[in-house]
Image: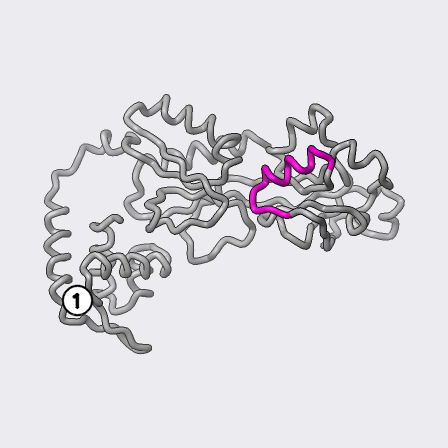
Amino acid sequence: MDRLEAAKVFVTIVERGSMIGAAEALDMSRSMVTRYLAEMEEWSGARLLHRSTRRLSLTGAGEQVLDYCHRLLELANEVPAVSHASVAIPRGLLRISCSQFMAHQILAPVVQQYLANYPQASVNFHVSSQTVDLVAERIDLAIRITNELDPNLIARRLGECESVVCAAPSYLASRAAITHPEDLTQHNCLTYSYFGDVMWRFTQVSSASNKMQGSELGQALNIPVKGNLSANDSMVVLNATLAGEGIAMQPLWAAKPYLDSGQLVPLLTEFKPQSLGVYGVYQSRKHMQPALRVMMDMLVVYFASLK
């Protein structure tokens, strides 16, 4: 827990008279303000605010803690400023939360270059397919792949994750050709929760197929799919696809080596599967540490190079 930040959030809540006002003043999400307040109350061991639908007011303990927080922030402001050049150099630990595939296959080369460029910096990966609490887990940067990002989060778009529908030759060998997304409803589709469990989305980009006569380029298609396997980890779905168990919509990054080798076959090339945004989620835009800023800048450049 960043107790100095929690103290600043608590003081701002009192000064602004609401958690919404504090969120706006600190350029922080309301959910993050609530979490910092909860951490502050846990640290002090007491309820600090009376909450009602109309106003907030300090408890007796809150008045005492507010005084301590003012003194704590005053002491922090007395710490001599480090020169601008020194501050601009990434140093110290950067904690990154992401999926296993992202850590191994995507972020690894960026992190290697980052550590080579900045020997006073270090990185710790928090590997998980689940959404994490940035404050509780002390995460500096969480990588999210989604088109439905919570608007309360502070985030920067880092890039785009293209998708591909594919299957192993062994799966396709004894089955009818797939020429239109609607054909997928007759197949075993292996689903990945972040790409949609029951609905795969496409945009028509070519009119070569006979089944597409009378339809228009750019038409959006939403196809309900089903199958006997789903997972919240793309590698589980990818391995099952390679084993010939069904059809999958995969991140192009993950599937490309197997498409190049012929272990997987791209399907429905006349249609563009839905792509997803890649976001870096962090706690606040103010006083962003150089390590976080530089890492996100490097990721933007790297994701652009993957297109």
Per the image, is 233 magenta?
yes
Secondary structure mostly seen in the magenta stretch: helix
Give above or below for 208 relative to 201.
above
The image quadrant that residue 16 belongs to is bottom left
Residue located 57% across and 31% down the image: 306
Would residue 162 be seen by someone viewing this image from the given angle? no
The image quadrant that residue 166 belongs to is top right
Bin the neighbour count of mark 1 within 10 Å (Cα to Cα): few under 14, some 14-19, many 20 and up: many
Residue located 48% across and 48% down the image: 130
Please name whichever residue, 9 or 157, is drawn nearer the observer in this view of the structure: 9
Give above or below for 274 relative to 39.
above
Give above or below for 271 relative to 44.
above
Residue 233 % position (x, y) = 56, 42
The image quadrant that residue 92 belongs to is top left
Per the image, is 124 magenta?
no
Q: Which residues are magenta?
A: 230-244
Counting the numbered discs, the total is: 1
Residue 66 % position (x, y) = 15, 62
Left or right: where 236 falls relative to 31: right
Left or right: where 136 falls relative to 87: right
Q: Which residue is mark 1?
A: 62
Secondary structure, mark 1, is helix
Residue located 46% across and 57% down the image: 151
Q: Amino acid at mark 1?
A: Gly
Left or right: where 305 falls relative to 191: left
Left or right: where 215 falls relative to 39: right
In the rendered view of the protein, which quadrant contains the C terminus?
Answer: top right
